[in-house]
Image: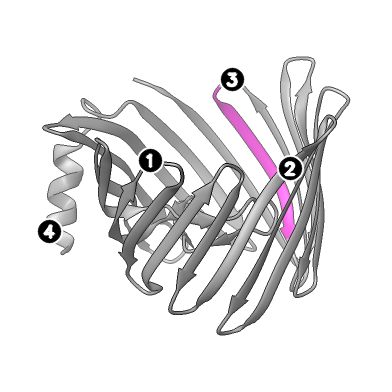
Amino acid sequence: MRRFVGFLALVLSPTLAQGYEVGAFGLGGQITLYLRLLGEVPVEGGRLFYALASYLQPGLGEGGLAVERLYLAAAGEASLTLGRFPYTFGEGRLFPYTWNAPSPAAGVEGVWGGFLTLYGAARLRLGYAWGPGVFAEAAWGDLKALAFPGGVGLAGSARLGEAVVYGEAMGLASGPRALLGWSWAWGPGEMVLEAAYPLGVGLAWMGQVEGLGVSLRASYGQGWSWGLGLGWEGFRVELGGVGPLWRWSGSWSGEF
């Protein structure tokens, strides 16, 4: 498997990648350096999407290649997706319900599997994901439903004036889950407020200040976390905390 992934890394080289990101981040006393290549390659009948990240942890003397995204999408009246794809259900931004996992290279790794998407009055997806199992998802406008062996869920959103209210309710094998969120324009950006069950509450603001991208976030869910992010063109830095641990990151991204 490692040889196969290494072969793909050589084939999907910077000559095929549309974008890159190079950076470093630290949590507590551990530092990680990484280089991410991402892009899409046209193939017969569809496109191959990928995000591959090589990383190094000098303090531990460890490193590797993270396959964050690698899937083939065949378009048509019924589209087929196969490989490692990202999956998040609902509208949650601060407390999303997702099958993705954190990547060792400061990104997210999708799930392995595949699904068939049928289009009509409603969008229907039938598929399999390694871990969660067989799943079915249906969407009608702003309403979405999910069913898989681990539970069922319903999510939706609605516009109230200039604000958007969204929520989700799920019955999972691990217990019930619910989320209610509200986003609205505030100053030169957007404010997001979310409350989740089990206990979780968070507030975030994202916007532009004098050409500088700014993001502020504070939340509580299994402990406190906070973050301050600044971005200018392709450069971004962030400082924050997760419980008693400090977290920082810096990256530069662009296109070839």
Most distant residue in the top direction: 210
Q: Is residue 147 left or right of residue 119?
A: right
User: Residue at position x 47%, y 64% from top?
Assistant: 99
Instruction: Indicate the secondary structure of the residue bearing disc 3.
Output: loop
The disc, 2 or 1, on the residue closer to the chain's N-terminal end is: 1
Task: In this rendered view, identify the residue nearer to me: 210 or 56.
Answer: 210
Image quarter of residue 184: top right
From the top left corner, tell me how far across and down residue 247 is, in percent. Answer: 67, 55
User: Residue at position x 12%, y 48% from top?
Assistant: 7
Residue 194 colored magenta? no
From the top left corner, tell me how far across and down residue 87 is, in percent. Answer: 45, 55
| Amino acid at the residue labelled 4 | Arg
Distance from disc 4 to disc 3, alpha carbons, whole Å, reads 36 Å
Checking the image for residue 233, the label placed there is 3
Most distant residue in the right direction: 187
Q: Residues within 10 Å of mark 2 (few under 14, many from 20)?
A: few
User: Residue at position x 41%, y 56% from top?
Assistant: 109
Q: Residues within 10 Å of mark 4 (few under 14, many from 20)?
A: few
Checking the image for residue 158, the label placed there is 2
Instruction: Indicate the secondary structure of the residue bearing disc 4.
Output: helix
| Amino acid at the residue labelled 1 | Arg
Checking the image for residue 36, the label placed there is 1
Q: Is residue 109 visible?
A: yes
Q: Is residue 103 visible?
A: no
Quadrant showing the C terminus: top left
Instruction: Indicate the secondary structure of the residue bearing disc 2.
Output: strand
Residue highlighted by disc 4: 3
Residue stretch rendered in magenta on the structure: 234-241
| Amino acid at the residue labelled 2 | Ala
| Amino acid at the residue labelled 3 | Glu
From the top left corner, tell me how far across and down residue 152 is, in percent. Answer: 54, 72
